[in-house]
């Protein structure tokens, strides 16, 4: 799915990330998948949907990482 996203194949990568999200119970994995889906929506020009997904990712990540952790910086960058 990352390859598809990097090559602007947003519909296919979005479907894969959505399917993976529906299958995982791990919060850290969910945060990553929300982040990736946010990237997909941004690439599609769906900025409000993107922001919502990125905020979900950030909310989960803040539970597990300190405020200066690089993974949070990545989330802030996308928002």
Image (cartoon, grey):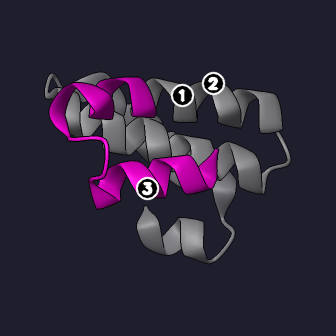
Question: Could you give the CA–CA distance between mark 2 and mark 3, rounded to whole angstroms?
Answer: 17 Å
Label 1 close to label 2 by CB (< 8 Å): yes
Residue at image coords 30%, 51%: 68
Residue at image coords 14%, 28%: 26
Q: Is residue 27 left or right of residue 14?
A: left
Mark 1 or mark 3: which is in front?
Answer: 3
Residue at image coords 54%, 48%: 76
Q: Which residue is mark 3?
A: 73
Q: Residues within 10 Å of mark 2 (few under 14, many from 20)?
A: some
Q: Which residues are magenta?
A: 58-79
Q: Which residue is mark 2?
A: 52
Choose top left, top right, bottom left or bottom right for residue 7: bottom right
Q: Which residue is mark 1?
A: 55
- SS assignment at label 1: helix
Q: Is residue 45 left or right of residue 52?
A: right
Q: Earlier in the sequence, mark 1 or mark 3?
A: 1
Choose top left, top right, bottom left or bottom right for residue 66: top left
Is residue 73 positioned above or below 37 on the image? below
Give residue 5's position: percent from left, percent from top: 57, 65
């Amino acid at each position: 799915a990352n390859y598809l996203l990097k090559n602007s194949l947003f519909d296919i990568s979005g479907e894969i990330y959505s399917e993976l999200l529906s299958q995982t119970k791990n919060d850290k994995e969910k945060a990553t998948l929300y982040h990736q889906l946010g990237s997909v929506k941004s690439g599609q020009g769906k900025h409000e949907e993107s922001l919502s997904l990125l905020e979900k990712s950030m909310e989960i990540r803040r539970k597990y990482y300190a405020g200066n952790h690089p993974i949070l910086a990545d989330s802030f960058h996308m928002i």
